Structure formats: C-alpha cells, structure tokens
Image (tube, rainbow, N blue to C red):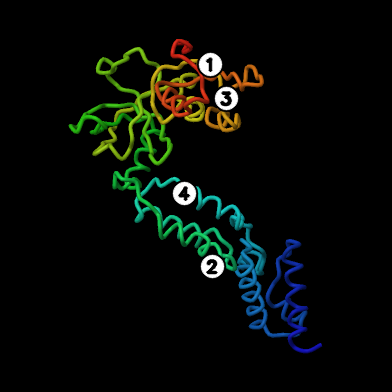
C-alpha cells in the first residue's frame, strides 16, 4: 500500500473502534499502527474535519479520566435541506417582522442548521424572496419585548400595558393577566384577561381579550402574581381552532351550506368544522367558533356560502 492508502485504512479502523464505543489511548494507537503520537493527533483532526464537512453532529473528545479519545455524545441532528427550506419559506410568507429582524433570523438558520455542503444552495433558493421581502406596515420592532412578555405569561405575572386601538389613536391603559402569545396572519398577539372586567363591554365573558403586540406602545411586568387553576388554564391550541382573524367574542356554533370547489379549504380554515351532510349541491357544515371573525370569513366566500345570522347559536 502507498502512504495514502495506509492512512485511509488507519482512519477507518480508528473510526470503527470509536463508533463501537471504545476509548482509544493515543500511545496505544501509535504503537499499533507504528506511527508517532503526533500522527494520531492529526488523524483525530482529520476525522473531526470529515464530520463537519458531512454535516455530522458528532465530535471526538479526549477523556482525561480514561486517558484516551472517544466519541462525544451525539448532538441533535441538523435540519435537512427540505426542512430548513420549509421553515424559511414559512417565515418569509408570514411577513411578521421588519427586514432588520427577519433577515438575520433566516441567515442564522442557514448558518447554524444547514449542512455545510448545502448552505450555498439553500441561500440561493431564498435570495429572491429575501430581496423582495415586504415589511408589515406598522414598522414596529417585535422581538425586543417578545421574550419578556412570554416570561410574564409563564410566571403568571400581572402586566400594565399602554395600547393603541385601531379606531382610536389615544392610548388606553390596562392592567392585564397575560395567558398566551399567538401569531396569526402577519401579527403577533398577546391574549390576556382584564384585571378589572367592569371596564369591558362583556364583563361576563369567560375568554381573554386579544391585543396586537405591535400596538402595545409600552408595558411593564409587575412583581404581582395571579393564579390560574389547572382546569381553567388558557389553552392556545384550543383557542386557535375556534378563532378567525384573531377577533375575540363569545363561543358560538354555526351551521352553513358550502357550494364552492373545495371543502378541504373550509375544513383547513375551520379546524373544528364537521361535514354534517353532503348532496349534489354541496356540503352542510357545523363548527364551533369565537366572535365576529367567522362572519367576515363566511361573507368573503360570496355565493359559495348560504347562511343567515339566525343560524348562530350562542353557547
């Protein structure tokens, strides 16, 4: 064998033993393969470089206690090309942040999560959409306060917020009990209960108020805690199934006739929807929903939806 073949054979044997869980003393390896300990060090570096080039989340470490080399605990695998492309496309389509917030996130995802050999290809697939990315019109930075609000939700801490309503330019001050952060159609939202429900239009409403986070002009997380019994906890996933366009309100059951081309689009839009009957004209659908958002969506379907408001049944 020539020198290159000998080294390749040596690297394969070392790798095979590492994968088997062996701890390999440097001196022992040098004696076995009739090379210097310095050569063994270079072999380990060659294997580390190979792992990095192949996108393998693995490393070779020197165990001082065992006095030898071994494989470290495998790290979580990188996202594959399809996964990272899907995540980045979803982020771009969300248009949820300013350019100076969105683009660095995409760059970090590609840098940290894509195998080295695929970074350029993934970056090129996203380049055009990144270049033409359209920011939300509100122009507000979202990220600086997002984690602090999330911590308030997790720790059940009262918040004071100053909020601008869509139709009223003046600031509204509220003390709220934050219970969730949600995202829907371009915007992040804080879901929270009013501490003083007498200021609310529906003081008996059992469901939280929804605040667009970009309209919260200032907030303060207080050292006051509130308690929520486990059985009464707010569940974002269940709420999301029943809310449209993030319009709150009372829980309702609706029934309508759909005569459009795709019932799948309706069932995907309304996760609680069930087809009650089907005939040659279309589908009769029932669903549980919150508030006025559903009325907006139904009217947007034009002639494909047949219903009247008297079909709305209050819970």
Secondary-structure class at tag 4: helix
The quarter of the picture where residue 275 lies is top right
User: How far, Cα to Cα, is label 2 from label 1?
Assistant: 50 Å
| Circles 2 and 3: CB atoms closer than 8 Å | no
* x then y, percent, for residue 5: 77, 84
At x 75%, y 81%, the residue is 31
Which numbered tag is attached to residue 259?
3
User: Which residue is under mark 4?
Assistant: 91
Q: Residues within 10 Å of mark 1 (few under 14, many from 20)?
A: many
Mark number, residue 122:
none
Q: Which residue is label 1 attached to?
A: 255
Q: Residues within 10 Å of mark 2 (few under 14, many from 20)?
A: few
The mark that comes first in sequence, 2 or 3, is 2
Sequence-earlier tag: 2 or 1: 2
| Secondary element at tag 2 | helix
Q: Is residue 277 above or below residue 30?
A: above
Nearest the viewer among 254 and 195 is 254
Please identify the quarter of the rendering in which residue 16 is found: bottom right
Q: Which residue is mark 2?
A: 120
Residue located farthest toward the left when viewing the structure as drawn: 170
Q: Nearer the viewer, residue 254 or 42?
A: 254
Q: Is residue 77 above or below residue 262?
A: below
Please name which of the two marks, 4 or 3, marks the residue nearer to the observer. 3
Q: CA distance from mark 4 to mark 3?
A: 33 Å
In the shown orientation, is residue 178 left or right of residue 312?
left
Callout 3–callout 1 Cβ contact below 8 Å = no
Q: Earlier in the sequence, mark 4 or mark 2?
A: 4
**Front tag of 2 and 3:** 3
C-alpha gap between disc 1 and disc 4: 34 Å
> In screen coordinates, is 268 left or right of 205?
right
């Amino acid at each position: 064998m020539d020198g290159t073949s000998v080294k390749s054979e040596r690297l394969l044997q070392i790798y095979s033993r590492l994968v088997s869980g062996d701890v390999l003393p440097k001196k022992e390896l040098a004696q076995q393969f009739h090379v210097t300990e310095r050569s063994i060090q270079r072999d380990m570096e060659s294997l580390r470089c190979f792992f990095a080039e192949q996108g393998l989340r693995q490393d070779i470490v020197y165990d001082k206690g065992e006095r030898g080399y071994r494989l470290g605990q495998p790290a979580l695998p990188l996202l594959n090309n399809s996964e990272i492309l899907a995540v980045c496309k979803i982020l771009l389509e969300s248009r949820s942040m300013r350019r100076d917030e969105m683009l660095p996130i995409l760059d970090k995802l590609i840098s940290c999560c894509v195998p080295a050999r695929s970074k350029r290809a993934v970056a090129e697939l996203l380049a055009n959409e990144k270049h033409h990315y359209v920011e939300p019109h509100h122009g507000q930075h979202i990220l600086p306060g997002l984690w602090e609000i999330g911590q308030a939700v997790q720790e059940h801490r009262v918040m004071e917020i100053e909020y601008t309503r869509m139709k009223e330019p003046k600031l509204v001050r509220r003390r709220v009990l934050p219970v969730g952060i949600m995202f829907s159609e371009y915007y992040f939202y804080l879901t929270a209960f009013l501490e003083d429900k007498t200021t609310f239009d529906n003081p008996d409403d059992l469901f939280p108020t929804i605040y667009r986070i970009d309209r919260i002009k200032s907030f303060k997380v207080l050292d006051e805690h509130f308690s929520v019994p486990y059985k009464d906890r707010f569940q974002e996933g269940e709420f999301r199934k029943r809310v449209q366009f993030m319009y709150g309100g009372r829980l309702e059951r609706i029934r309508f006739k759909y005569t459009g081309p795709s019932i799948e689009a309706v069932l995907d839009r309304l996760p609680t929807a069930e087809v009650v009957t089907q005939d040659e004209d279309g589908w009769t659908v029932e669903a549980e929903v919150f508030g006025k958002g559903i009325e907006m969506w139904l009217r947007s379907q034009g002639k494909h939806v047949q219903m009247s408001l008297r079909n709305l049944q209050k819970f």
